[in-house]
Image: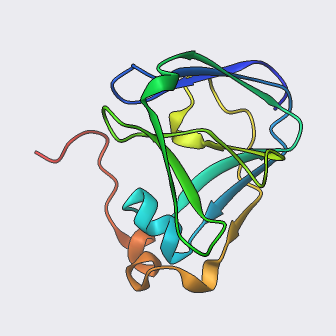
Amino acid sequence: MTDNTTGSCLCGSVTFEVSGALESFFLCHCSRCRKDTGSAFAANLFSTTAELRWLSGEDLIKTYRLPATRHQKSFCSACGSAVPSIQMEGTLLVVPAGSMDSAIAVRPDAHICFDSRAAWEDQLEQAPRIAGLPG
């Protein structure tokens, strides 16, 4: 993905633009990412060359770094939505795929830390698929 793409948080206070190539798209099943998202995995886009520009709400962004690890998560302090972060001493842009408003033209490259997946995840394919809210 090389076009300019935009994204935002749930409340719309934080908006951003990413310019350049998003090089990787991983679905991480580690326990830390599951805690971050409250879900089966985190879906993140990665780039070592793309540039991030905050359009609004930069002052609302908070970052939590898990002590003694490289694990971190940035989020909107108003609504809690995950937002992009610059990691690895400024060398890596991490963009939560769900924060993107523009279409993502790439498919995930891989499920990572798959051996750490939640035990219930193996049952997901058997769950019914409902187009809207259950009635």
As drawn, which residue projects farthest toward the left?
A: 135
How was the colour assigned to the protein in this rendering? Answer: rainbow
26 vs 14, left or right, is right
**Which quadrant does the N terminus fall into?**
top right
Name the foreground residue: 20 vs 60. Answer: 60
Front residue of 71/33: it is 71
In the image, what residue occupies the spot 63% across and 72% down?
69
Q: Nearer the viewer, residue 66 or 14?
A: 66
Instruction: Answer yes or no: is residue 131 visible.
Output: yes
Rendering coords of residue 101 (x, y %): 54, 24
128 relative to 79, above or below: below
Horizontal placement of 56 versus 129: left or right? right
Q: Quadrant of the C terminus?
A: top left
In this rendering, the count of numbered labels is: 0
1 lies left or right of 67:
right
- Residue 92 coordinates in the image, percent (x, y): 79, 47
Q: Is residue 59 left or right of residue 2?
A: left
Residue at 33% x, 67% y: name it: 127
Name the outermost residue toward the top: 55
38 over 12 or under it: above or below:
below
Q: Position of residue 97 (x, y in %)?
A: 59, 42
Residue 40 visible here: no
Residue that appears at 63% across and 26% down: 103
At x 81% / y 20%, what residue is drawn? 3
**Residue 33 at x, y percent in the picture:** 52, 65
